[in-house]
């Protein structure tokens, strides 16, 4: 079942914070501290038009943060509420992110995740993201990944 994705508004702040809290709380013990997304200023991200909400049956069940950069779109966060996990919402949001980046003229989308979030790294790899770096920042061990999202010449010819 497809969710509706829309730009977040100020009224979404509490729902976004709750989705992030519940989606990332399981990683606190594994990482030994709160993951980066639990520390972000979502009010500022909403005001900067970087936040999106995924709704299913009228309820907010996912969030997506996209930050334009000079040469790529940064997929800063994708989080699904635990009750909506396992239905393909994360993949739908990743596809949406890639489409938004492509529509904005980017040829590359980048992300980073904590190296302890091995299931995320596996998912991103299966979806075509390639690891580009590993480093420690702000006390967090991060894995950097990127994906080329430019349409190929062959696909333009075929359509």
Image: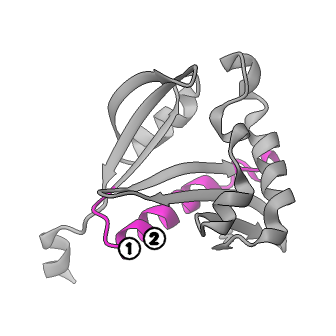
53 falls in the magenta region: no
* Left or right side of 66 for 83: right
Q: What is the quadrant of residue 125 in the picture?
A: top left
Tag 1, which secondary structure? loop
User: Quick one: quadrant of the C terminus?
Assistant: bottom left
Give the class, few, some or many, for how many residues have Cα within 10 Å of label 1's Cα (few <14, many ≥20).
few
Picture coordinates of residue 94 (x, y %)? 51, 57
Q: How is the image coloured?
A: one colour
The circle on residue 100 is 2
41 in relation to 31, above or below: below
| Residue at left offset 58%, top offset 64% | 50
Give the class, few, some or many, for how many residues have Cα within 10 Å of label 2's Cα (few <14, many ≥20).
some
Magenta stretch in the rendered image: 80-108
The reply to whether dot 2 and dot 1 touch (C-beta < 8 Å) is yes
Secondary structure mostly seen in magenta is helix
* Left or right side of 72 for 64: right
Judging depth in this view, the residue of 30 and 69 nearest the camera is 69
* Left or right side of 47 for 74: left
| Residue at left offset 77%, top offset 69% | 56
39 in relation to 54, above or below: above
* Left or right side of 82 for 151: left
User: Quick one: quadrant of the N terminus?
Assistant: bottom right
The circle on residue 104 is 1
């Amino acid at each position: 079942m497809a969710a509706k994705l829309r730009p977040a508004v100020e009224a979404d702040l509490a729902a976004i914070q709750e989705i992030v809290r519940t989606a990332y709380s399981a990683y606190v013990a594994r990482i030994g501290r709160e993951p980066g997304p639990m520390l972000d200023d979502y009010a500022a991200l909403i005001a900067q038009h970087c936040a999106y909400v995924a709704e299913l049956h009228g309820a907010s069940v996912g969030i997506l943060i996209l930050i334009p950069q000079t040469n790529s779109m940064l997929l800063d966060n994708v989080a699904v509420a635990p009750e909506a996990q396992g239905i393909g919402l994360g993949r739908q949001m990743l596809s949406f992110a890639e489409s938004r980046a492509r529509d904005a003229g980017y040829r590359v989308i980048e992300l980073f995740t904590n190296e302890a979030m091995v299931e995320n790294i596996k998912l991103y790899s299966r979806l075509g993201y390639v690891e580009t770096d590993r480093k420690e920042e702000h006390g967090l061990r991060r894995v950097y990944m990127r994906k080329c999202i430019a349409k190929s010449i062959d696909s333009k010819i075929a359509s």
